[in-house]
Amino acid sequence: MPRRGLMILRLVVNGGNHEADVEPRLLLSDFLRQGLGLTGTHVGCEHGVCGACTILFDGEPARSCIMLAVQADGHAIHTIESLSPDGITLNPLQEAFRDAHGLQCGFCTPGILMTLSAFLRDNPAPSQAEVRDALSANLCRCTGYQHIVEAVTRVTRSPLR
Amino acid sequence: MSPEARYVNARVRRNEDARLLTGRARFVDDVQLPGLLHVAFVRSEHAHGRLIKVDGAAARRRPGVVAVYTFDDLGEYGRPAPVLVPPPPISGLVFHPRTHRPLASGKVRYVGEPIAMIVAESRYLAEDAVRDVIVDVDPLDAVVDLEAALTAGAARVHDDLESNAAAHVVQRKGDYAAARDRADVIVARRFTYDRGAAAALENRCVLAQWDRQAEELTIWDTTQAPIPIRNGLASRLGLSESQVRVVAPFVGGGFGPKIMMFYPEELLVPWASIRLARPIKWTEDRQENFFATTQERGQLHDAEMALTRDGRILGIRDTFLFDTGAYDPYGLTIPINTQCTLLGPYDVPNYSSEFTAVFTNKTIVTPVRGAGRQHGVFVSERLLDLAARELGIDRVEIRKRNLLGPDRFPHNHEIMFQDSAPLVYDSGDYLPALEQAAATIGYAELVRQQAQRRSGTRRVGVGIACYVEGTGIGPYEGARVTVELSGKVRVATGVGTQGQGHYTVFAQVVADVLGVSVEDVQVITGDTREFQWGTGTFASRGAAVAGSACHAAAMSVREKIVALAASVLGAEPDRLEVAGGRVSVRGAADRTISLAQLAARANPLRGAVRPGTEPGLESTAYFGPDRGSTASGVHAMIVEVDVETAMVEVKRYVVVHDCGRIINPLLVEGQIHGGVAHGLGNAFYEQLVYDEQGQLLNASFMDYLLPTATDVPPIETAHRETPSPFNPIGLKGVGEAGCIPTGAAFAQAVEDALNIEILDIPLSPDRLFRLIQQAADR
Amino acid sequence: MKPAPFEYFRARSVEEAIDLLSEHGPDAKPLAGGQSLIPAMNFRLATPAVLVDLNEAVGLSDVTAQDDGLHIGGMTRHRTLEQSETVARNAPLVTAAMPFVAHAAIRTRGTLGGSLAHADPAAELPAVMLALDAVFTVRSRQGARHVRAADFFTGLFTTALEAGELLTEVTIPPRPVRSTYAFQEIARRHGDYALAGAAAAVAVDEHGRCTSARVALLSVADRPVLAEHARRALEGEPPTADAINAAAAAAAAHDIDPPGDIHASSAYRRHLAAVLIRRVLERAFHSRETS
Amino acid sequence: MILSGTFTFNGPRQKVWDLLQDPGVLAKALPGTERLTMSGPDRYEGVMKVSIGPMTAAKFDVTVTLADKQPPERFTLQIDGKGGVGFARGSAAVTLQEQGDGGTAMDYTSDVQIGGRIASVGQRLIESVSRMMMRQALEALDRELRARIDADASGS
């Protein structure tokens, strides 16, 4: 990591407190991946378009590739790793992705899950058009999106919710 | 077929998903090693120029920079990369192989060509040092336009060649000139299909670690073909193959360009890692990806079709130029695919096809999903539409009149396919697919409503296009199937996987043969330490070729299981049942043994075994088809065009396809959806725009437009199954099918809505606006 | 694609931000939402020596309806503008435009002041503010000054802001009676920079005659442009279909000279502008009963 | 990209010619010029900084040459710029024609080539920026000419 002009960074990631010395220019995505080893957050474009790096910043979706790590000082971040704390049990949305074949290479999937987690929290019963609208913030080259939309439909119609 | 098909042909959810959904799956860029160094490249800003000076001295002095390499530092290692795919034996074929070097020497030939490599303590620092390298280039005129490239005074991409022609190939069947003389109507047009990017969401990444004590090199690489990369790098580095391990773990989408390219970065990172005795990683960024990762699609066709008055094809002639970019390491796979796929599902008695591959000062061209097939389909389907219009025959009807009937298989087209085998269709049944697609989209009703659809601001059009696709080509793949002491099964194969679901489909095949649960079959792909024979994932061949190898290996293991169980249980083999992870004697519930127990018995620790006994319940098998199998299908779509804004919305999309026997319909649908989205991208959104000096003007996701969830419609898919005779399960490939007829169907639908003529793909609102204006002016 | 090094300061108040900006002069860039600035830094097209982070500065993100209009703090997030009922009541044009601004994950970070100061000619909010005749409060060590939207956007990514100045607040004048609004744009994909767009704020008198017709266009010039010819053609007239058509055609012909790019030629942009001016005017005048 | 047009100066042709050949004037007219010094006959070198909003990194080492001179009627101006974000090269063919009313019409046709990062991610802005720089250059020239004419008038 870069050494010059380090700043202290204190933040909460997936419920745990972290403290690190970082260079101001370090991108939040790089800090999460390299600094904390949370490699589930993927980097696809580094200009805020593809959405693969989407995380929750104080509960709201944000692109970690166009934020500085130092901006997270004093804030709470959730990454894909928070959706399944034991790393094995899938939450209903993850389970629906598996059932509906809502992922292929899986590279864009973490960003999509984080985007949809916030979306479904705010809109528990969206229409298909609303789902596609929310999903249009994330690029996927493999799925053509259809099975992702189906996965969301499974969750929103699930009696568990 | 498998003894009991419980999983094959079932909608089985994927074994690999849990890791991907929780963020645990390891992609190459996720690998972190102590002391890891990072790389940035100094790349050419000029499309064409003489390299006067490259000076890395200042960069070397920058704190945090460990090494700076230019061509002069490479010595013998700087020689050009190998030709990856030698051209097939076609008589009269001319091919000038010119491949890239790891770093530019003498000349730069495309924007983004690597000139110097910087190794530093972080990627941030390496990028800082890029500015420090002094590069002096004397710019030359760039070769951009395909026709201009072949004119006498054109600048030459490779000075040692007489022209920019990289290859010339003629293939003929019958006598087109005679057919033309007999024809009632000739339809002739010029068609273009412009460049696009594969744009996998994961950029490329290479990480190499040289273990000085063990003298072993481990390379993590986002490649579709780890074994050829291992073999090629070992030989180039002067190591034995067993000293090199290439791992392609989870790979974030391939779509063609992650094939065994021996990209400059792929050659240099391992080399530098040995030199510096440090682990080194290069992670491509999105901007680099637009220049440094290979692209596809640029072709210019002058084509004509000769027909009878009642719409029967007498022959087709096509002359086309193929843009191969600055180098041609991948040979002629793409244009030969174009040449062969153009014939489609039709009876074309006379065919004359000629192409010239052209060097240009643009990024190297290698196959991208579809790999030239969509161009052929675009040309023949467009010609049929134009002929239909000229002859006053319905578009579906003219296709029906020309389809090959089910009695025509195997059908020999009498020309050579890219796999060096004659172009022979193995099996197919085309007419029912066309009828089903037309019925599903409501074609007849839409035709009746044509006048109404073409009025008002929002105009509606319908398009319907057919295709065939050569898939599942050789040479071979292999697999090793092992029943482990736990009773669980492990399958290792050489192909890489980039999201296709190999972890699951191979497991399905093996689980059926061995009577185990699909979750109990662990598939390992893409690690040369696990399996070291095979070629890779390309040409829609993974399931058909490697899947067949898995099947063969599993069948062999099953024989061992049955033989051993027969002796242990004292029963005739034909009375044994292999199911539920056990072998049981039919009708005697107490005479049963688990696979775990059998595996233990097959590997005794004491005592004696009979001479010739192979230990374990394990087998390795290989499969190589005589030739590829031919998938086929029909796509139909309805579009709505706002004639005031030239914006197009796809309202419905129907796919009727035939990929032979299906292992997993859920995954096949996923492949089709993704292919269609990619095809719609190529039809309306995605175009790499180069200016006249070879500068790429849209090297970002802001300007290079991948379709999003609001651009891709729901896709209605119907499967038809005509098994292939060329492999035991009857499989054909499906990975590329979705994107092959999409452009042709889209052009036809928009044309139908607006009553204009569309000859160029990709279309865009801007291009469509011009066409609408021109039609209004006429 | 990693940013070049810079010095980073976190401002805790407006005053601190202004002090830092004037101290560091033209080398310093305020960091608001960062959704345009950081991508430009990742591409190394922007290499500011100093960043002054406004995100922790208090008192810059209040939204209040007052007698003289709707006051919106410069650091108000796009997401807040989109969801605020106060904004919907007092400036429905803003609410109508927000879904067109990129995507939710960008709007959670992007800010009003950031978008206006960035002055991207293809951005929605500058045009909306121009249509609404908003007034921007600009503060520096010398105190505060007020700049009308029409005077604020001075060119390509260029505004009336001087070094050391900060856009702290936007005031949108109170809604006239019988005022209605509409926003439309044409983009290649949802959330992209528009090929062209139009924001309309219109009002009529008790006889249905047009008293005000402000249509601001985006992505058809180096800055947001008011369709002056449309305004002149309509004000004082009943907004009939013919009048709207003529107004749209006149404005597209005379008020703009659009630049072309790979996505849209100049002629296409001009054509789209005519269509969009007509469509927003039709929608605005015909949605009278609902707003 | 081709940018062409006609600009009318309110002054005699010889004066406009002299103006256009003056390196001091060129330095003022070329937008963002931080320094421009003569490095040979009709050849100047210097630094130009093109700053557009957040794009602050566009600093170019430039070489300006004047060629094909036929006083007071036509010449070609070439600019070659190289910087961290890419390169820009342009040549402008300039023709001056006397107008009946004592003014001078300048026809210009310029071919601008942009390469490197500014071309690959900045395409949306290239035409606007080129137009803006052209406008700024012409306005600066016009201002300079008027100042000279005013100076002449007060001096005589």
Image: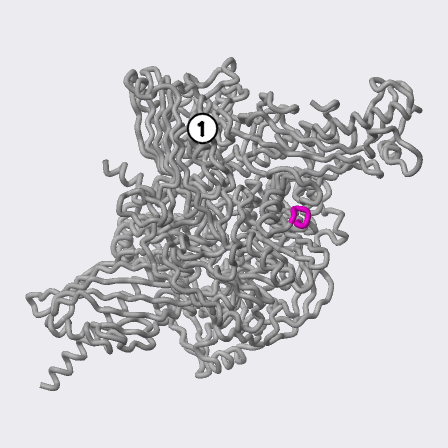
x and y percent of residue B151 in the render? 28, 43
Can residue B304 be seen at all in this image of the molecule? yes
Closer to the camera in the image, B332 or D58:
B332
Closer to the camera in the image, B133 or B521:
B133
Can residue A122 be seen at all in this image of the molecule? no
Residue A111 falls within the magenta-colored stretch: no
Residue sitting at 46 percent across and 83 percent down? C141
x and y percent of residue B603 in the render? 86, 36
Q: How many marks?
A: 1
Residue B476 found in image quarter: top right
Element marked by disc 1: helix
Residue B241 falls within the magenta-colored stretch: yes
B289 vs B602, left or right, is: left
A41 vs B116, left or right, is: right
Task: Name the amino acid, label 1.
Answer: Cys
Q: Which residues are magenta?
A: B240-244
x and y percent of residue D101 in the render? 7, 68
Residue on which the image places disc 1: B340
Residue sitting at 66 percent across and 70 percent down? A74
